[in-house]
């Protein structure tokens, strides 16, 4: 059995993103071999079938292709709730300035934010990552792998740099989208 | 200095000379002019009334005008004048009091203005508005992500998913039912500080023991003799159990009913 088939088998049964190191350990090969195998598998899946390989939250995972989204959604009927503006605001601040305390968030927003922090914690998008060495040792928050997964990010370095009045941010994001999605967003 | 024709050497810069004349009505001090005590200094030459006006209007710097000789001239005016007009003397006294007060204030050390901070307080950077582009980016990615389905994230409970459905029950239905219970609840008795409080988890246990498969309205479910705070505990525990999927909720004939989930 070649490494590409083995990778496909492992990824098929995985219910979370699998890092390259884990795959290499499972296959008894090197990380380089795994990366080569992943490239081949990715190309193979793109060319056929309804499933594709997605690099997400620091690993690889199989997912359905976007063209089948409507069909799958009708079947699974997921009840997704969009995050409110205030939750998105807090989430963006945490993502960019982590680790940080609730007070740090409130300093940027200028409004009380403990409810939003709690709501994001319940959604497992942010979590406690430590305590600040300051009076009262306030809790420090950071984003989770769930955050990366829910926002289709592989790691935090993919977040666009924040510069005032810079419209390039949107351009960077649009570049990361597939051609169909680009047309939709434009 | 010359008062009433008698020369007086005050060895001071100003010369003050009272002169006899009919009382003059001027507006500076009201209706009566002070006596005609003439003041002569390097920066001012004129009557006491004029000095008062100039100082009041900031036309003369009072620091350059010694007041002691003027006061002395005023005393001499009072002593030497055969017929002092009381209104004029009072007007002069007011003028002198005003000048003395102004000078006293001018002689006090000036309070230094508060120094400005060397480093102005900086606004947090980036400000919340500067995250707008990032938020837009996250929304786009989330939209993109919603088109892909993964093995576990859709099969297990998604944190984005509401793990329960309220069907036809709206928050206002729940609020109305709760209001009915609160209306009949007794007021709370005063508890000593530090008394042990019941946790919501404990209350949830109580609710689970009470609730059965049959549908019961909130009125029936919550005991008759509850206090207001106990009613709040009951309601919160019910909501939490509904959220956890342990209890079902429905609306029947305008009333909210609860039952243990199947």
Image: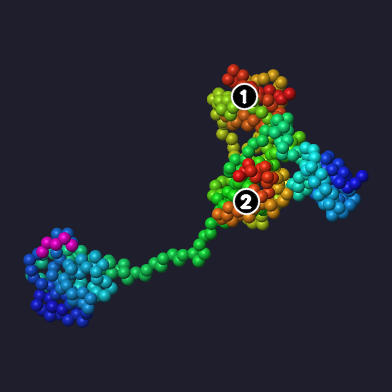
- Based on the picture, tell me whether residue B32 belongs to the magenta stretch: no
Identity of the residue drawn at 66% across and 43% down? A181
- Mark 2 touching mark 1, by CB under 8 A? no
Same subunit, labels 2 and 1: the answer reads: no
Identify the image's colour scheme: rainbow, by chain, secondary structure or one colour: rainbow
Counting every numbered tag in the picture gives: 2
Give the quadrant of residue A123.
top right
Identity of the residue drawn at 86% across and 46% down? A4
x%, y% of residue B41?
21, 77
x%, y% of residue B258?
66, 23
- Read off the residue under disc 2: A171
x%, y% of residue B51?
20, 69
* Chain letter for mark 2: A
- Based on the picture, tell me whether residue B26 belongs to the magenta stretch: yes
Q: Nearer the viewer, mark 2 or mark 1?
A: 2
- Read off the residue under disc 1: B168
Q: CA distance from mark 2 to mark 1?
A: 43 Å
Q: Which residues are magenta?
A: B24-28
Q: Is residue B58 above or below residue A10?
A: below
* Chain letter for mark 1: B
Give the quadrant of residue B164.
top right
SS type, badge 1: loop
SS type, badge 2: helix
Q: Quadrant of the N terminus of chain A?
A: top right
């Amino acid at each position: 059995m070649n490494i590409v088939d083995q990778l496909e088998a492992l990824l098929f049964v995985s219910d979370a993103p699998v890092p390259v190191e884990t795959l290499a350990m499972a296959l008894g090969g090197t990380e380089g071999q795994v990366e080569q195998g992943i490239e081949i598998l990715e190309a193979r899946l793109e060319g056929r079938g309804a499933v594709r390989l997605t690099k997400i939250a620091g690993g690889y995972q199989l997912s359905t292709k976007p063209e089948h989204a409507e069909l799958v959604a009708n079947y699974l009927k997921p009840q997704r709730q969009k995050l409110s503006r205030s939750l998105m605001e807090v989430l963006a601040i945490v993502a960019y300035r982590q680790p940080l305390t609730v007070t740090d968030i409130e300093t940027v927003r200028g409004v009380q934010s403990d409810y939003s922090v709690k709501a994001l914690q319940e959604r497992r998008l942010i979590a406690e990552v430590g305590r600040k060495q300051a009076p009262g040792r306030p809790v420090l928050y950071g984003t989770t792998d769930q955050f990366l997964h829910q926002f289709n990010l592989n790691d935090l370095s993919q977040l666009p740099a924040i510069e005032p009045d810079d419209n390039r941010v949107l351009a960077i994001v649009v570049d990361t989208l597939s051609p169909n999605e680009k047309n939709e967003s434009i | 200095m010359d008062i009433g024709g008698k020369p007086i050497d005050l060895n001071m810069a100003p010369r003050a000379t009272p002169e006899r004349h009919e009382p003059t009505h001027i507006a500076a001090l009201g209706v009566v002019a002070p006596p005609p005590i003439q003041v002569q200094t390097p920066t001012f030459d004129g009557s006491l009334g004029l000095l008062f006006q100039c100082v009041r209007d900031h036309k003369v710097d009072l620091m350059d005008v010694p007041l002691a000789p003027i006061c002395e001239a005023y005393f001499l005016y009072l002593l030497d004048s055969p017929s002092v007009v009381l209104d004029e003397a009072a007007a002069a006294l007011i003028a002198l009091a005003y000048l003395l007060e102004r000078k006293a204030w001018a002689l006090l050390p000036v309070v230094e203005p508060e120094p400005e901070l060397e480093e102005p307080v900086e606004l947090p950077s980036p400000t919340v508005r500067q995250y707008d582009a990032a938020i837009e980016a996250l929304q786009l990615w989330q939209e993109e992500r919603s088109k892909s389905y993964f093995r576990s994230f859709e099969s297990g409970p998604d944190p984005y998913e509401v793990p329960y459905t309220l069907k036809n029950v709206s928050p206002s239905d729940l609020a109305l039912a709760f209001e009915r219970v609160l209306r009949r609840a007794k007021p709370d008795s005063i508890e000593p500080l530090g008394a042990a409080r019941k946790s919501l988890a404990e209350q949830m246990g109580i609710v689970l023991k009470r609730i059965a498969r049959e549908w019961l309205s909130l009125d029936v479910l919550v005991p008759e003799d509850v206090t207001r705070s106990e009613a709040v505990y009951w309601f919160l525990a019910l909501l939490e159990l509904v959220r956890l999927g342990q209890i079902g909720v429905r609306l029947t004939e305008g009333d909210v009913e609860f039952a243990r989930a199947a």
